[in-house]
Image (tube, coloured by chain):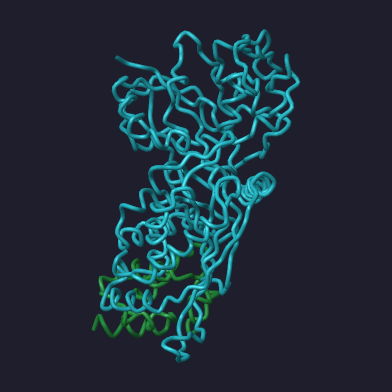
Chain colours: A green, B cyan
């Protein structure tokens, strides 16, 4: 699983809860809850989908690392290596 | 012994007057079980999986896709064992008037009377008249002309009936029940002032529904239901500011090292606390219909879920009193995801949109302090949940910073008074101070 594949899985997981989101219109450094208008339930569902697709365990202490796409990319890249 | 029963267009809430049959997932002769998805409907709430409510065999498919028909119209028929009907009735005694799909004995039909089949692609301009054609009964004079033309209705009068019972034909009662119209408020133009189809056709909401216009229809459907509620239900409102420090601490512990699949949000605790308080105050859990209140024996809490493109759906979690907090959370995650995932083809099930006994609307996520909701008829209460905010709190003669939410209750004054509503809110507040017991 390379960086491009991880990015693809992140976008897919966001689209699980926000199907209309276009990756070209999101700022990867901003908080995705604001960028993609996710509420808490959506955010938990996003993380659940991402954990399932990447196979990487995400615990509550890690949640802040998923607030932006770039921080999530860094975290998941780090975990898989 | 076998009985033939009608499978009708279900009422998936007070804001639904008609639905579109998009696809049959069964054929004549198929065996189905209770809970099997038998058809896909397109409604103001989006695409819905319609379930069977009995075990049995499909005997007729009377409406072909794609067709829009009013709530209550017969879509198909199935044969079931009479034993199965009785068992289902026994199981659902308390929910008979909320779950419209389980057919009551009066709807068991005479097989010799066959409703006119609705042809595919037929444009239906007179939903109520069509419903009459589909639901032809012995008490109706058979139409001499085609079903799309006006029907004459034989109003059945009972000279022995000395009560103030409203005169109306069975078909009018059936439609009124499906669309939750109060017949006592309708002036009949039939014999002896009886209400005939024409009278309710003028009143029943006629929301046209076509694929591709979900938002417009949803908006008008919500508008019709909420207008009806505000016009008919004498709402009153109470609120309580509730410290939630203990609940938050409990959640922090419960969620520690947990994965998203087992993460619990505050709203799940609130739902459980509501269910426990409703067991103590059942007067807020049930239905006001035909001038009286009927408490429900199960606690089915509807959750207002805003859709990403605008509008809301209000699916219910059933038997919340029997679920653990984790089970409630899991179910909430699931219905939220499916409600908002229409574009991926996921759907809610018809049973999830029926039978709610009370509603919760959670606006806290959007930074709102308080929300006083409009009651979803025929329910008698709706609870609003505000945002979590830090406030100064007095504890042991010291001022500390603590967390608080505001819970609001809108209740139907025909059924409860302020005192009982206040007791319910206080009970709810107490329950949330003991999260470990929820």
Residue B171 falls in which quadrant of the image? Answer: top right
Q: Position of residue A55 (x, y in %)?
A: 25, 70
Residue nearest the observer in this picture, B9 or B209: B9
- In the rendered image, the residue lying farthest to the bottom is B398
- Image quadrant assignment for residue B131: top right
- Relative to B234, B348 lies left or right: left
Residue A42 image offset from top left, x and y in percent: 44, 67
Q: In this view, does B89 lie above or below B410?
A: above
Q: How many marks?
A: 0
Q: Is residue B404 left or right of residue B193?
A: left
Residue closest to the far left:
A81
Residue in front for this viewpoint, B316 or B96: B96
In front here: B314 or B159?
B159
State the residue in front, A42 or A49. A42
Residue at image coords 43%, 55%: B338
Q: What residue appears at the point 40 percent right and 53 percent down from the top-left corner?
A: B280
Q: Residue drawn at (63%, 49%), measured in percent from left and top?
A: B222
Quadrant where the C terminus of chain B is found in the figure:
bottom left
Q: What residue do we see at 35% from left, 20% from top?
A: B79
Decide if residue B262 is on the left or right side of residue B8. left
**Residue B92 visible here:** yes
Q: Quadrant of the N terminus of chain B?
A: top left
Rendering coords of residue B329 (x, y %): 36, 62
* Camera sees residue A1: no
Please state the horizontal and vertical placement of residue B221, each as a whole percent of the image: 63, 46
């Amino acid at each position: 699983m390379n960086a491009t594949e991880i990015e693809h899985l992140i976008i897919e997981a966001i689209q699980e809860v926000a199907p209309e989101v276009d990756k070209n219109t999101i700022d990867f450094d901003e908080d995705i809850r604001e960028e993609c208008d996710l509420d808490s339930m959506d955010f938990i569902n996003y993380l659940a989908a991402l954990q399932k697709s990447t196979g990487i365990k995400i615990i509550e202490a890690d949640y802040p690392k998923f607030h932006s796409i770039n921080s999530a990319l860094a975290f998941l890249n780090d975990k898989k290596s | 012994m076998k009985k033939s029963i009608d499978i009708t267009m279900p009422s998936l809430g007070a804001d639904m007057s008609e639905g579109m049959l998009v696809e049959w997932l069964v054929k004549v002769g198929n065996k189905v079980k209770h809970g099997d998805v038998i058809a896909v409907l397109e409604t103001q709430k989006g695409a819905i999986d319609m379930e069977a409510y009995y075990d049995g065999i499909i005997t007729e498919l009377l409406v072909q896709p794609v067709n829009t028909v009013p709530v209550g119209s017969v879509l198909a028929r199935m044969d079931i064992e009479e034993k199965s009907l009785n068992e289902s009735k026994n199981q659902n005694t308390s929910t008979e008037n909320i779950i419209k799909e389980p057919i009551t004995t009066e709807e068991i039909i005479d097989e010799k009377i066959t409703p006119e089949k609705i042809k595919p692609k037929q444009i239906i301009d007179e939903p109520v008249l069509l419903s009459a054609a589909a639901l032809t009964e012995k008490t109706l004079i058979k139409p001499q002309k085609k079903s799309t033309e006006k029907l004459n209705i034989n109003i059945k009068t009972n000279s022995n009936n000395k009560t103030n019972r409203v005169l109306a034909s069975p078909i009018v009662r059936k439609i009124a029940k499906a669309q939750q119209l109060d017949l006592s408020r309708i002036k009949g133009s039939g014999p002896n002032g009886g209400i005939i189809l024409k009278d309710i056709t003028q009143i029943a909401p006629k929301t046209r529904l076509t694929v591709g216009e979900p938002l417009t229809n949803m908006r008008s459907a919500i508008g019709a239901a909420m207008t009806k509620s505000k016009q008919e239900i004498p709402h009153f409102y109470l609120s309580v500011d509730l410290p939630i420090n203990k609940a938050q601490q409990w959640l922090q512990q419960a969620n520690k090292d947990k994965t998203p699949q087992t993460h619990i949000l505050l709203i799940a605790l609130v739902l459980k606390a509501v269910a426990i308080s409703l067991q103590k105050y059942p007067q807020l859990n049930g239905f006001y219909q035909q001038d009286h209140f009927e408490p429900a024996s199960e606690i089915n809490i509807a959750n207002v879920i805003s859709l990403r493109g605008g509008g809301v759906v209000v699916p219910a979690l059933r038997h919340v009193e029997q679920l653990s907090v984790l089970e409630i959370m899991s179910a909430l995650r699931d219905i939220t995801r499916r409600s908002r995932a229409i574009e991926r083809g996921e759907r809610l099930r018809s049973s999830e949109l029926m039978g709610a006994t009370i509603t919760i609307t959670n606006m806290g996520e959007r930074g709102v302090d308080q929300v006083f909701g409009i009651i979803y008829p025929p329910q008698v209460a709706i609870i609003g949940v505000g945002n979590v905010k830090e406030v100064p709190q007095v504890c042991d003669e010291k001022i500390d910073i603590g967390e608080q939410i505001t819970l609001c209750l809108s209740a139907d004054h025909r059924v409860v008074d302020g005192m009982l509503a206040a007791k319910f809110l206080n009970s709810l507040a107490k329950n949330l101070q003991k999260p470990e017991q929820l």
